[in-house]
Amino acid sequence: MKSLSLAALVAAFAAGPAFAHVTLETQQAPVGSTYKAVLRVPHGCKGAATTNVRVRIPEGVIAVKPMPKPGWALETTKGKYEKSYDYYGTPTAEGVTEVSWSGGKLLDEHYDEFVLRAYLTADLKPETTLYVPVVQECEGGATERWIEIPAAGKAADDYKFPAPGLKLTPKK
Amino acid sequence: MTRQLRLILVLLGLALASLATAGQALAHAALTKTVPADGAVVASAPGEFSLSFSEPVAPLVLNLIGPDGTSRALTRFALADRTLTIIAPADLAHGTHILSWRVVSEDGHPVGGSVLFSVGAPSAAPAITANQTEPAVRIALWLGKLGLYLGLALGIGGVAFMVWIAPIPATARRPIAGFLVLGLLSLPVAFAAQGLDALALPLSGALEPAAWQAAAASSFGRTALVVGLALLVALIALRMPDQSGRLVAILGWLGAGTALAASGHASAAEPQMLTRPAVFLHAVGMAGWAGALLPLAFGLRQPEGVQALRRFSRRIPALLLAIVLSGLALAIVQVEHPQALLTTPYGLVLTGKLVLVAMLIGLGAFNRYRLTPAAASGRASARPLLTRIIAAEIAIIVAILAVVALWRFTPPPRALAAAAAQPATVHIHTDKAMADISVTPGRTGPVTITVSLLDGQFGSLAAKELRLALSRPEAGIEPIERQAAKQADGSWQVGNLTLPVAGRWTIELEILVSDFEMTRLKDTLDIRP
């Protein structure tokens, strides 16, 4: 019994780098800058291989350019934004709202990264967290949705399926 | 450096490391497989359980909650790769068990859940128990009811004799008046006992106003008022001259039927369009039949009494038909299944009553087909024999009323089933979404959970998926998770779920509004034992 509690204690503190969630590699960026988002997919859906990764582009993030990936079909969905954003002097009111890499096969025991580049507009509020909902679809119809956005006063840790987050800092 | 100091330093370092990574989304291990499977019914008690996770874990708390609700910690387990194998206790009872687990994965985030499995078959819902009142109060209640019934049947029914047969013989007036007074005296007894029973007070509480208020507030309050009026009206009719007395007697007679139709299990049953008229008809018919016996018996002391007897014989079949048909309709509504006649207290009372009624009809038929023609043809020995048999009939009627008064203590199968089927419900309202959740029946055993979803502004909410998680944190039960299925009417349902433990459960809804949007609602609801 003693060894059990000690093991649990050690495990509870040992927050290692092996994330089980889909997360962003760079978790801090200034607004009004171009950001390279590297989505890290550490495992499949309860053991099943990942076949599809879909990313919802949050409002205020524009000029999205996903990086193609060998073995995966890249698709984007375009739509209107809630308002017009300024992109180096060009008013931008529509663009990519969803990105998906599909048709690949990422085994549960393997690791991979999915990359896109985007502009974080100056309209985004610094000192807040920007959440990027990701849906991970797997073989056999299993789905893991990393889409929960913490309510005020709560942390991503309080949720079972937290969306990857990015801390916004003031414009440089 | 001592070992303790080294340990403290290591832990401090780990704590700092965990602080450094705080704010990042940490991982949780996911359960990938369990043996037995969640919701499974296994033929015999398993020797071990196994839980497989998506990554290595260490167990924090492992509890097994049995069908009787007792919880015990499981301390014998082995970890291999990502699978936790737990030695099961040897004496697993039949029924539904909850294996509640809480583990921590290497990222430091504890996660928990529950696996529901049944040995042999899922736990059945427990038997229903009625609340108990002090025996003295129950006896007072029974005596009060019996006195009222006697006043209605032999008192008011006796007065009704002048309505449909003949003037009441002078000698019969005193005993009929006696039954009317008995009814009036029983009224406060029944009334007070009703209040005591409602509040579960002892007999000594009869003087407290609360008991009387409780009785007045119940449906019996209406009945008591109408009964009292009907008894008084009948008493007045008895003292009036025959012609005008008949009109007043009709009022009293109808009042007896109205009084019984105003309260009681039978009157409260659905469909009301059937049950209330049926109770009225049954009561009026019963009073007419039973009440005629006293005047008939006293009348037969004189030869002229035979005239009244012949008229009674001609008219009774129509009344009997009304009694039997209305009684049959009520029995079908109340008993629901024929086997309930012998397996439920309510059914047993009805069976006892039917046996007595059969005896009564047998005696009545003998009177009608053998003795009445004999008495009419002037045979001298027929009249005294008739009088004696009628006296026996009155005795049987008293016995029937005594048995029927027992119904006060035996809710019919319909009412028991209705009480047991009562769902436990909760309404959750947030600015994002609203949910009406009902667990049917709202007691331990197999349940069905139905959820209706609306958005925060009472508009329709077209959810893609709905998951439910039920937990009882204070009983050490981690969430039992179920995927709800969408029904044709737009609501969501979880079936095939057995809740083995009563008490306050926490229910959490995980509503997938669209591919990228999820809303959570959380509240508690009470599950009855």
Image (spheres, coloured by chain):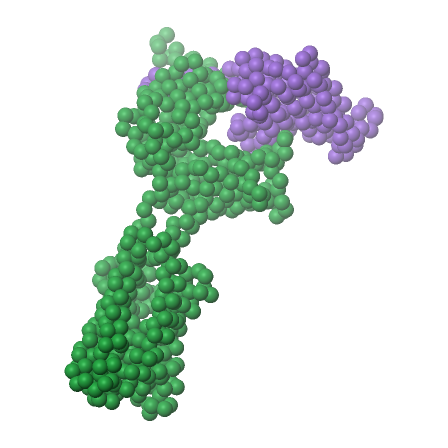
Chain colours: A purple, B green
- The quarter holding residue B355 reads bottom left
Q: Is residue A112 left or right of residue B380?
A: right
**Taking B188 as reference, is A93 left or right?**
right
In the rendered image, the vertical position of residue B195 relative to residue A65, given as above or below: below
For the N terminus of chain B, the image quarter is top left
Residue B334 in view: yes
Residue drawn at x 33%, y 61% as measured from the top left: B198
Residue B382 lies, in percent from the top left, at 19, 81
- Residue at (34, 22) in percent of width and height: B48
Residue at 52% x, 21% y is A46
In percent of width and height, residue B273 lies at 47, 65
Counting labels gives 0
In the image, A159: left or right of A29? left
**Closest to the observer: B199 or B423?**
B423
In the rendered image, residue B65, in percent from the top left (x then y), is placed at: 34, 32
Q: Is residue B75 visible?
A: no
Q: Is residue A144 above or below residue B151?
A: above
Q: Quadrant of the C terminus of chain B?
A: top left
The quadrant in which residue B103 appears is top left
Q: Is residue B54 left or right of residue A34?
A: left
* Residue extending furthest toward the top: B1
Would you place residue B446 above or below residue B322 in this image?
A: above
Find residue B63 and report its horizontal and vertical position in percent.
36, 28
Query: What residue is drawn where x is 31% and y is 75%?
Result: B289
